[in-house]
Amino acid sequence: MLTIDEIRKRLPHRYPFLMVDRVLELEEGVRAVARKNVTINEPFFQGHYPEEPIMPGVMIVEAMAQVGGLAAGGTKKGLVPLFAAIDKAKFRRLVKPGDVLTITVEILRARGSIAKVAARAEVDGELAAEGVLTFALVKRGDEAADGTA
């Protein structure tokens, strides 16, 4: 299990884009399970359906990708995961303030600096989102200004 302090040491993200609150299971190179507590204080709720707040799907995908970066193990080695592709993304249920996302990521393939993961986000055991995410693991400081490696 990783606490928020340990997560912050491994991921470069900071408020408001750090989307992982706790890692429950981590078997680097294999899988990870983590949690994201969704609160009304999230800055995106101010503009995303403010009268009926719904967590944007892109933020759920970002949370899944951050857990994928931890599962790939590159963040422990000082590498930063950058998105390369998002495939088969599906959104199955609304995520609202008060929900707790449980994110499960399994490594499908990891070769060199490329990792591909299957990710699922659930709320109370019900599937909220899923997808296959591919990212490049690059050394810190090697990221291009436009986000490409």
Image: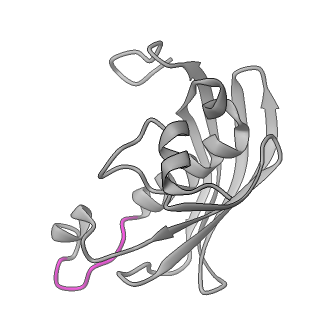
* Residue 71 x, y percent position in the rendering: 71, 45
* Residue 82 x, y percent position in the rendering: 52, 31
Is residue 125 visible in the rendered image? The answer is: yes
Question: Where is 126 relative to 49, above or below?
Answer: below
* Residue 98 x, y percent position in the rendering: 39, 84
Q: Quadrant of residue 115?
A: top right
Is residue 105 visible in the rendered image? The answer is: no
Q: Quadrant of residue 33?
A: bottom right
Residue that appears at 44% across and 18% down: 143
Residue that appears at 31% across and 50% down: 15
State the quadrant of the N terminus. Answer: bottom right
Magenta residues, as a range?
50-56
Most foreground residue, 8 or 100: 8
Answer with left or right where residue 146 lies relative to residue 32.
Answer: left
Prevailing SS of the magenta stretch: loop
Question: Where is 85 relative to 24, above or below?
Answer: above
Question: Where is 103 relative to 74, above or below?
Answer: below
Most foreground residue, 54 or 80: 80
Residue that appears at 50% across and 17% down: 149
